[in-house]
């Protein structure tokens, strides 16, 4: 189990990241990444402290972080959920790609290694290595947006999505790009593959591999950072601490040794790694645990704001709070149902129930947007009736006005501004806007996630009920005789 300092030290390598016209020298000190690296360091400290109950004994007898656990029964899913929740609470659910997300995919891969055929030992070895070293692995599994109506091999140039350029005795060389590496800039390893359906002819893109972030030829181009230029956590509590960054990832002829290859020019294995193993289920289970915490946090902010402004006494406001409660409870209920109704597969891995898990995944964009809309409604213009920064709260020429007019009857000016600033970082800042985009797309476009819900519902039961009912009546016998 590594601690926060060891995590920070592990980031000081030769990674190649360009932002705002410059190459980043050290992500742990650069203003765009300093906040999030500190936050992730806190997660590692938290996990390393036995008091937080995040350490388990692995099947090999070593000790590791529970986020890497392969759950074998319902109780182990619950144990894993409690560990993931600890991390989610430390980031208020606002770090989508904390290290537990891809750890869940790796655990899922390693639990069904046969899916990887001749590369299965590579998968097992890397899982064990990542688990035992407590590595932070991120992923890019979506081809870049160029022309979505065309297959990978039909794009106007061969290496737009990442593909095999050369096969060598000791490994492969890949070229191209992939979107959109959340937290990749501050992680240790990257898992690269393609989760979107591949077609015959796409074999060069039907690959999966891992590589260290500082591999020569790997370049990251992050979007603008929301922490940059924000001087104070008091003014932007989430932007300054939890902006995990999203990067376009470019592979300029990158060498991958065979030991790091999981699937190779194999369309079926590249699909099956996600959906025949429990990887997609366990990864999405982690994502829903995080979402649960985020919704609880957001609802807590709404509850506090309405109490502070005295609006919670209005029945109309209570109704809106009730709506928030229903939305959050639905997510939590579906998460727990997926755990309760889990099944143990042929390899002895507990798989969260797909009907409930994908049922909620398919609604996530609407639920999150709904929660944000209600919070917007409840805060009114209060989130904009704030000074531009904390400076006005301390400047002798302005502080008395601020104290006098930005207040609530129950708390002082500072507490009110602090809470409303937080609300703005949830609903209105650039960070907030990106989070709406994240919850809508991180798992695929809305039509994709609802496709998962459709495919995994299990229609035998409803069809049986309908057929039984239809079978209970026919045309009147007398009429049939007349025919
Ligand atoms: C904040 C954020 C973080 C992300 N982090 C990661 C990450 O860490 N790793 C990673 O691999 N990916 C990540 N992604 C990428 C994410 O997986 C993709 O955004 C997602 O798969 C959807 O692809 P797209 O954005 O290219 O949208 P598209 O697939 O281009 O879809 C955009 C819209 O076009 C329409 N459309 C497109 N194709 C079709 C079709 N076939 N049929 C009907 N309508 C269609 C739909 O209206 C759809 O909503 C992230 C995305 C976001 C926004």
Image (tube, helix red, strand yellow):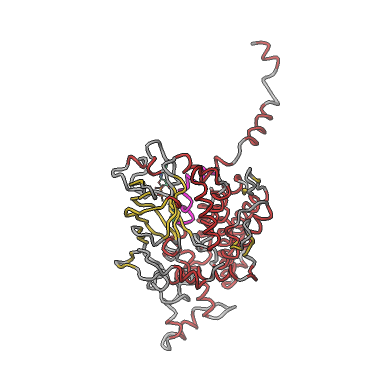
Quick one: 453 or 372, which is closer to the camera? 453
Q: Which residues are magenta?
A: 437-452
The spot of residue 188 in percent (x, y) is 45, 62
The N terminus: image quadrant: bottom right
Can residue 424 be seen here? The reply is: no
Residue at the image point whose x is 59% and y is 78% from the top: 410
Residue at the image point whose x is 65% and y is 46% from the top: 344
Can residue 170 be seen here? The reply is: yes
**Where 323 falls versus 118 (above or below)?**
below
When asked about the image quadrant of residue 292, the answer is bottom right
Quick one: 339 or 161, which is closer to the camera? 161
Residue most toward the top?
A: 482
The spot of residue 416 in percent (x, y) is 53, 76
**Where 476 falls versus 310 (above or below)?**
above
271 drawn magenta: no
Magenta span dominant secondary structure:
helix
When asked about the image quadrant of residue 44, the answer is bottom right
Drawn side of residue 43 relative to residue 163, left or right: right
The C terminus: image quadrant: top right
The spot of residue 75 in percent (x, y) is 69, 55
Drawn side of residue 363 relative to residue 194, left or right: right
The spot of residue 452 in percent (x, y) is 53, 44
């Amino acid at each position: 189990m590594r601690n926060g300092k060891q995590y920070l030290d592990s980031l000081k390598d030769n990674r190649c990241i360009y932002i705002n016209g410059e190459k980043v020298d050290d992500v742990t000190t650069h203003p765009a990444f300093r906040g999030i690296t500190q936050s992730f360091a806190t997660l590692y400290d938290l996990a390393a402290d036995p008091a937080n109950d995040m350490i388990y004994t692995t099947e090999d007898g070593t000790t590791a972080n529970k986020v890497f656990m392969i759950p074998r029964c319902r109780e182990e899913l619950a144990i894993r959920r409690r560990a993931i929740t600890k991390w989610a609470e430390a980031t208020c659910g606002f770090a989508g790609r904390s290290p537990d997300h891809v750890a869940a995919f790796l655990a899922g891969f390693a639990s069904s290694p046969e899916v990887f055929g001749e590369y299965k030992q590579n998968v097992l070895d890397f899982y064990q290595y990542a688990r035992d070293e407590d590595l932070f692995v991120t992923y890019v599994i979506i081809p870049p947006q160029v022309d979505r109506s065309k297959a990978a091999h039909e794009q106007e140039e061969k290496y737009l999505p990442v593909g095999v350029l050369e096969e060598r005795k000791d490994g492969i060389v890949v070229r191209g790009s992939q979107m959109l590496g959340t937290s990749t800039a501050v992680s240790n390893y990257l898992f690269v593959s393609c989760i979107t359906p591949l077609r015959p002819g796409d074999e060069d893109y039907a690959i999966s591999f891992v590589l260290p972030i500082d591999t020569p030829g790997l370049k990251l181009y992050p979007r603008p950072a929301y922490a940059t230029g924000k001087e104070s956590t008091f003014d932007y509590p989430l932007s300054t601490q939890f902006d995990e960054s999203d990067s376009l990832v470019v592979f300029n002829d990158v060498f991958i040794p065979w030991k790091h290859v999981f699937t190779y020019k194999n369309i079926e294995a590249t699909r099956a790694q996600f959906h025949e193993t429990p990887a997609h289920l366990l990864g999405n289970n982690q994502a829903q645990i995080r979402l649960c915490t985020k919704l609880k946090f957001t609802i807590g902010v709404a509850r506090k704001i309405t109490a502070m402004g005295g609006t919670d006494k209005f029945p109309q406001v209570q109704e809106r709070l009730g709506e928030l409660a229903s939305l959050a409870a639905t997510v939590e209920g579906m998460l727990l149902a997926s755990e309760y109704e889990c099944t143990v597969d042929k390899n002895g891995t507990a798989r969260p129930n797909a009907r409930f898990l994908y049922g909620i995944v398919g609604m996530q964009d609407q639920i999150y947007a709904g929660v944000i809309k209600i919070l917007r409604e409840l805060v009114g213009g209060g989130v904009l009736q704030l000074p531009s920064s904390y400076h006005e709260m301390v400047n002798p020429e302005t502080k008395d006005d601020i104290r006098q007019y930005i207040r609530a009857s129950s708390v002082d000016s500072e507490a009110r501004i602090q809470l409303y600033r937080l609300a703005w970082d949830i609903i209105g800042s650039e960070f907030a806007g990106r989070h709406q985009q994240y919850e809508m797309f991180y798992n695929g476009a809305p039509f994709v996630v609802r496709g998962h819900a459709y495919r995994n519902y299990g229609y035998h039961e409803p069809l049986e009920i309908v057929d039984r009912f239809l079978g209970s009546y026919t045309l009147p016998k007398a009429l049939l005789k007349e025919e």
